[in-house]
Amino acid sequence: MQNEGYDSQVDDLVSRWQEEIYDGVLASDVLPAITIYAYASLQGMTDEYDVAATFPMLPTDAGLPDHYGNALIARLRGSCTSIRTGLQAIQAHMDCHAAIAAARRAHESLWQMFWLANPEVDANSRIRRLLKLTRQEIGEALRFFAYGINTDVESTLRKYESEIEGVVGKEVYRSKDGRGEYQGYFGPRFNEPLPHDLPPVPADVEAEEIAWSMMSNMTHPNVVFDWVFQIQEDSQDQMDKFQLLPVLAAMNMVSNISTLVMDKAHIQREQVLGVNTTFRQLVSPAQLLLG
């Protein structure tokens, strides 16, 4: 049976995530640390980049650290918004596809952020990664503008795309790139252990790829999935737990990455521990909801 007071606990999580995380430590502690990390970690770069010709988002006088920091911040903010959306879907007792879709977006944003921020990767390589992601984002935008909706925007985007390809070629980012680096870095480290309770698979099959594919498919209406859940005893309780799991995993990821960046920005240890505690105080009650 569902935990007593389940709805009120979810209500509390939604409001606290907004107040204590998004409007709280994220704004006051984590984002300033990202800006510091962006500038400090790019010192001593040996490669030169034509910033104005390859980065379309910020004003033309913005420097490379500005673009790099903005990319990290945008992904972290986006992931936190997706987590709140997932919690709101659970709060509204929507079918679990909505919460899982939001959690999937959060995971992707966080994997990309870690791929860009990975402190074990040198500065030049991280900037090249940012250019690869920028080119992919331009490609997504061109799907819209290529229909003649705005020829000026389309031509500008294609110019940026061409400049970037001249630097990094046609290599693309894959979700398993960021996921693999995140798990390799945090697997043996702090906070919650990574959930890897996957069934055994043949040696030539990548278990993580199967799990991600399943999660992706659950973001769309799936009649068989719904039917299997609905015929089981306590189906709503099981549905509640199933949709909470990926949202909870994303909450853990935000905590891990946020405290990592603060640490690498050489923020005072007490401040880093305080931010980590704030995250833990939300993750713990979310775990209790699983029963």
Image (tube, grey):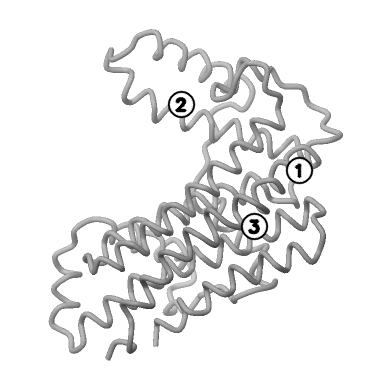
Q: Give, as a three-letter code, the residue at label 1.
A: Ile
Q: CA distance from mark 3 to mark 2?
A: 27 Å
From the viewer's perspective, tell me whether residue 153 is left or right of residue 2.
Answer: right
Q: Which quadrant holds the N terminus?
A: bottom left
Task: Residue under label 1, please give it.
Answer: 36
Which of discs 1 and 2 lies nearer the camera? The answer is 1
**Residue sitting at x 40%, y 56%:** 104
Q: Earlier in the sequence, mark 3 or mark 1?
A: 1
Closest to the observer, 120 or 107: 107
From the viewer's perspective, tell me whether residue 54 is left or right of residue 228.
Answer: right
The image quadrant that residue 219 belongs to is: bottom left
- Vertical placement of residue 97 versus 281, above or below: above
**Residue sitting at x 21%, y 87%:** 234
**Residue sitting at x 42%, y 27%:** 139
Mark linked to residue 138: 2
Judge the density around disc 2: few (<14), some (14-19), many (≥20) Cα neighbours within 10 Å. Answer: some
The image quadrant that residue 247 belongs to is: bottom left
Farthest right residue?
Answer: 44
Q: Earlier in the sequence, mark 3 or mark 2?
A: 2
Q: Give, as a three-letter code, the residue at label 3.
A: Ser
From the viewer's perspective, tell me whether residue 236 is left or right of residue 145.
Answer: left
Q: Earlier in the sequence, mark 1 or mark 2?
A: 1
**Residue sitting at x 61%, y 69%:** 278
Circle 1 SS class: helix
* Residue 71 locus on image (x, y percent): 59, 38
* Residue 173 locus on image (x, y percent): 52, 41
Q: Are marks 3 and 2 in contact (CB under 8 Å)?
A: no
Q: CA distance from mark 1 to mark 2?
A: 27 Å
- Vertical placement of residue 123 versus 155, above or below: below
Q: Give, as a three-letter code, the residue at label 2.
A: Ile
Task: Residue under label 3, please give it.
Answer: 258
